[in-house]
Image (cartoon, rainbow, N blue to C red):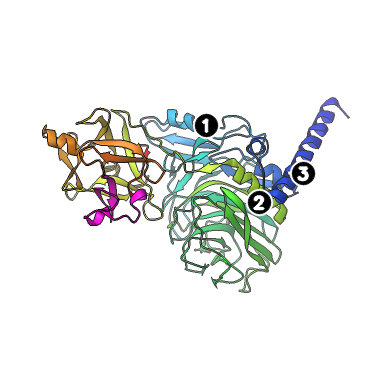
Amino acid sequence: MTYRQLIRRARKAVLGAALTAALTAGVLTGTATTSQAATQGPCDIYAAGNTPCVAAHSSTRALYGSYGGALYQVRRSTDGATRDIGVLSAGGYADAAAQDSFCAGTSCVITVIYDQSGKGNHLSQAPGGGAAGGPDNLANAFEAPVTVGGHKAYGVYVAPGTGYRNNNTHGIATGDQPEGMYAIFDGTHFNSGCCFDYGNAETSNNDDGNGTMEALYFGNSKAWGWGSGNGPWVMADLENGLFSGVNRGFNANDPSVSNRFPTAMLKGGPNQWALRGGDAQSGSLSTFYNGVRPNAPGYNPMKKQGAIILGIGGDNSKWAQGTFYEGVMTSGYPSDATENAVQANITAAGYTSGSTSTGTLTPGSRVSLQATTAPCCTSQYLRHDDADTKVVISNTNSASSATDKADATWIVRAGLANSSCVSFESTNNPGQFLRHFDYQLYVNTDNGAGSFAQDATFCPTKGNSGTGTSFQSVNFPTKYLRHYNYTAYIAGNGGSNSWDSTTSWAADTSWTVAQPWS
Ligand code: AHR
């Protein structure tokens, strides 16, 4: 045995012992610590359980303790240049600052989500398919800010029309071969469109029949299966069906998800599959289903084709929305113990929506103000309404028109009435400012009057809900910038106007200061 082989063997032994200890700690006590998260990743745990990752995707962190490569690639709109975004250190978190500086003053999309497993199973722009043409849109790189382990990072924000795929994979299960997978999603970002999926799909981009897919789904579609409550649910997309349990339709054991960061897990082998889930911030996994394959024809044995999709259905159905932070696919059927240890690793990673501000309130900079009220409004931004001078919130995403993006972008100015506060000037109607009149918000031209300056000045404070930033009216300090029925006002927490309603007041008055749309 050479010296190198000896060192490799010693390293393996140390790693194996550490993993066994971590597995035990994770399974028995659920007390994985942050330092464990830094030295081992979910894929080290799957490997120790003899079900290694064959795909590992994340825009927020390394999924192996030793991974020091690129997590994803962004492309900026000004010159089409691309840049790989890596980790701050091997096994660590995304270098979000690299994205911020590369994309400063312009917009960026995520072009590639790299596979960390070494199998080359990278995800890139999905082509057209049987259900819808393509190529699909790419995710705006700034739309899903998140904090992980105290570090700023960005998720993959899938607006309807966005999708990623790899039809030429290596090592992914085909036919009836066993596999496992997990993903962490944004529990507040979903819809009922088909199909916000991550996992195994057809290599043809078409619906090739029952059993040709095995992917995680997240959303509130009731087109095939559903669970208790009103959703959203974690389900299995096995093709021509989202399964919440043994068969299509209602399965009471699949609960509605109310976590900000759900962990979703799916595994499938010969006449056996299981759906599990939990809260990626704390606690253990629950099993929603564990049993035989559906009894409808075609699902036993399975006919998996081994492509990987993100954000779309197997046939490129692209009407769904959601946000993906990380996910892996394994070779082999992971044990519950291995999955429990992976969940402990995930909870130790420290996902929080915490300080998600990505823009700055520095005079001269541009920002967009994103509503934080979930689940209605987190894709909506404060904007002026071209039909009149009113200010509203509405969905804005990478596919929005240039006008819509500009309407939802504001230039920060020193407060017209108080320079330690701020005013917001419209980017596409220069000279017009966000101001209240009779407590409703408008964009109006600054007429130089002192009363206008007062009505157009807002003092940023910590978000009333604990998230983001709130904007206090300088001349009505009990009232804050609020959206109510998708229209903007200054509102008190209780009061004589309908928009002073205490319901959702804290969330409606808390905004994410986001990267500018334009
Ligand atoms: O199984 C649900 C969906 O049905 C699949 O994702 C898609 O390929 C088909 O339209």
SS label for mark 2? loop
Q: Considering only order in the chain, which callout, 1 or 3, is on the residue closer to the N terminus?
A: 3
The residue positioned farthest toward the right in the image shown = 1
**Looking at numbered disc 3 in the image, what kind of residue is underneath it?**
Thr
Is residue 381 shown to the viewer in this render?
Answer: yes
* C-beta proximity under 8 Å, tags 3 and 2: no
Residue lying at 52% horizontally and 40% vertically, measured from the top left: 112
Is 326 displayed left or right of 12 in the figure?
left
Q: Which mark is residue 95?
A: 1
Q: Marks 3 and 2: which is nearer the front?
A: 3
**Looking at numbered disc 1 in the image, what kind of residue is underneath it?**
Asp
Residue lying at 67% horizontally and 52% vertically, measured from the top left: 339
What residue would you read off at disc 3? Answer: 20
Q: Considering depth in this image, is 391 or 329 the residue closer to the camera?
A: 391
The residue positioned farthest toward the top in the image shown = 3
Q: Position of residue 51 (x, y in %)?
A: 72, 50
Q: Position of residue 35 (x, y in %)?
A: 65, 35
Near mark 2 (Cα within 10 A), the count class, few <14, some 14-19 or many ≥20, is many
Near mark 3 (Cα within 10 A), the count class, few <14, some 14-19 or many ≥20, is some
Q: CA distance from mark 3 to mark 2?
A: 25 Å
Read off the magenta span: 479-507
Q: CA distance from mark 1 to mark 2?
A: 28 Å
Indicate if the residue with disc 3 has its beta carbon within 8 Å of ligand 1. Answer: no
Q: Marks 1 and 2: which is nearer the front?
A: 1
* C-beta proximity under 8 Å, tags 3 and 1: no
**Looking at numbered disc 2 in the image, what kind of residue is underneath it?**
Ile
Q: CA distance from mark 3 to mark 1?
A: 30 Å
Q: Which mark is residue 134?
A: none
Residue lying at 46% horizontally and 61% vertically, measured from the top left: 194
What residue would you read off at disc 2? Answer: 172
